[in-house]
Amino acid sequence: MNIDETIQDVLKFLGIEAEIITKQFKYYKDIHKELNGIYILIQDDKVMYVGKGQIKKRQSTHWKKANGILKPKDPVGWHWLKKNVMTIPKDWNIKYLILHKQTELSAVEGCLIHKFQPLANNETFIDEGRTI
């Protein structure tokens, strides 16, 4: 099952409708600043990170992390990713789902993290017992 099919399955299971938009990650600054929802960072059809919140605002910090500019307090998943498999994100994509209710944000984010097991999310990192 591909990424789009998985997203659709999760939304259908939860009974949630959402507009889904895909663009190249390097153009995250073009995203309207008021949009809330779920965002998915993708490298070569592999989900690297799933998050929620104000989409554009969150991407400025993720862009730095994806380019290897990390602070010691950043999630260990990003540090592991940088050390082991990171490539420059110029060819990454971002998919974002426009949602408004906090319950929808939490439910969709949790389901997508569970389904995709993204490498940079701490939940995946910890569940797989990785160490830096």
Image (spheres, grey):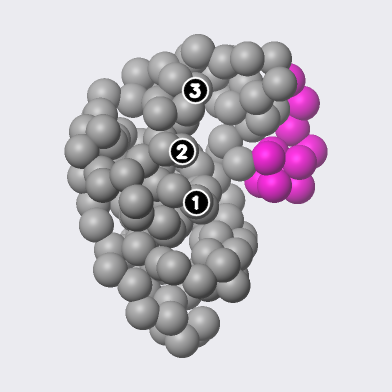
Please report the residue visible at 57 percent of the width from the left and 36 percent of the height from the top.
Answer: 120
Q: Identify the image quadrant of residue 75.
A: top right
Please report the residue visible at 35 percent of the width from the left and 19 percent of the height from the top.
Answer: 88
Pick whichever of labels 3 and 1 is earlier in the sequence.
Answer: 1
The N terminus sits in image quarter: bottom left
Residue 106 is inside the magenta segment: no
Question: Given contact means CB atoms under 8 Å apart, are the residues at marks 1 and 2 in contact?
Answer: yes
Coordinates of residue 108 in the picture (x, y in percent): 52, 67
Which secondary structure, mark 2? helix
Residue that mark 2 sits on: 58
Pick whichever of labels 1 and 2 is earlier in the sequence.
Answer: 1
Residue that mark 3 sits on: 65
In the rendered view, would you say 55 is above or below 113? above
Residue 121 numbered tag: none
The answer to whether 90 appears left or right of 71 in the picture is: left
Coordinates of residue 17 in the picture (x, y in percent): 36, 79
